[in-house]
Image (spheres, rainbow, N blue to C red):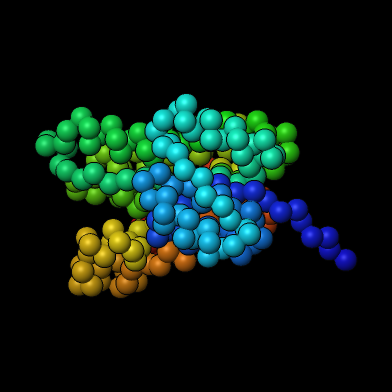
């Protein structure tokens, strides 16, 4: 007779976006208690939390602000460790590097990379004390293949690959895994604006865009007990692009 596992507490940064929202839904479906994080899109995060009901609540802070992030996390850590962190927060600010501004470079890296540090670092010791943790960074196929106009974005996301590989080595003995998921062209506001159907057929061997749910299914598995031996990996969800 199997015993029900305890409810895991999950934090999804960028939880108000298309992929982030799908990840929140998938984790809630696994009976996780989910914190839906947002910064500029707090209203959309609240709509999702309302949809998910008692399994979800919102939290709002700017991941690039170290003090604000730590203050917000200290409040939720009073109720216990965060067992699952999905760092999905990220922004695009595209331009050829020859014409890129300092602001474009730093802002994109601040959200994806420095934001990861600000969020993950305070959660690690409480995770370690509980001898369980799942950390998943949402990266991009751009970090694996490169993409014109996205030197900043690809740099930020590929840096997360090195971070999870190193973090996996640091924390594996405490039951904590760290992995990255690298989506390709995924349906949603950003992809729909950037790619038409013909372009997608040219780029993607599968001939279609992926869905946020397909990304979320992999993330949810990596966050499960069953994925305990998958650690330090970068896994693509890209329809065969690489």
Q: Is residue 84 above or below residue 152?
A: below
Residue occupying image coordinates x 52% and y 50%? 58
* Tag count: 0
Q: Residue 86 location, x and y as percent?
A: 52, 47
Q: Is residue 150 above or below residue 24?
A: above
Name the outermost residue toward the left: 99
Q: Residue 148 location, x and y as percent?
A: 19, 48
196 or 180, which lies in front?
Answer: 196
Image quadrant holding the N terminus, namely bottom right
Residue occupying image coordinates x 79% and y 60%? 4
Q: Residue 22 location, x and y as percent?
A: 48, 62
Residue 166 seen: no
119 or 36, which lies in front?
Answer: 36
22 or 172, which lies in front?
Answer: 22
Image quadrant holding the C terminus, namely bottom left
Residue 186 relative to residue 130: left or right: left
Residue 184 relative to residue 66: left or right: left
Please tell me in which quadrant of the rendered image residue 103 appears. Answer: top left
Name the outermost residue toward the right: 1
Residue occupying image coordinates x 23% and y 72%? 197
Residue occupying image coordinates x 48% and y 47%? 37
Q: Residue 213 location, x and y as percent?
A: 47, 66
Q: Is residue 200 above or below residue 170?
A: below
Please tell me in which quadrant of the rendered image residue 74 appears. Answer: top right
Residue 194 relative to residue 159: left or right: left
Residue 56 seen: yes
């Amino acid at each position: 007779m199997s015993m029900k596992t305890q409810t895991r507490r999950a934090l999804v940064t960028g939880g108000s976006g298309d992929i982030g929202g799908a990840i929140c839904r998938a984790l809630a479906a696994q009976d996780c208690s989910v914190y839906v994080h947002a910064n500029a899109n707090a209203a959309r995060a609240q709509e999702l939390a309302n949809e998910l009901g008692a399994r979800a609540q919102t939290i709002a802070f700017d991941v690039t602000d170290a003090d604000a992030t730590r203050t917000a996390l200290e409040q939720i850590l009073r109720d216990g460790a965060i067992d699952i962190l999905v760092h999905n927060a990220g922004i695009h600010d595209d331009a050829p590097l020859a014409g890129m501004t300092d602001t474009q470079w730093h802002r994109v890296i601040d959200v994806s990379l420095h934001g990861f540090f600000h969020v993950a670092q305070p959660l690690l010791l409480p995770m370690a004390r509980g001898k369980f943790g799942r950390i998943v960074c949402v990266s991009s196929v751009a970090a694996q293949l490169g993409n014109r106009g996205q030197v900043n974005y690809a740099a930020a996301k590929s840096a997360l690959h090195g971070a999870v590989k190193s973090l996996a080595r640091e924390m594996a003995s405490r039951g904590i895994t760290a992995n990255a998921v690298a989506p390709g062209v995924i349906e949603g506001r950003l992809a729909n604006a950037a790619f038409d159907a013909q372009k997608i057929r040219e780029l993607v061997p599968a001939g279609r865009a992926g869905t946020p749910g397909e990304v979320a299914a992999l993330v949810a598995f990596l966050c499960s007990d069953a994925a305990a031996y998958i650690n330090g990996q970068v896994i693509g969800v890209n329809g065969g692009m690489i």
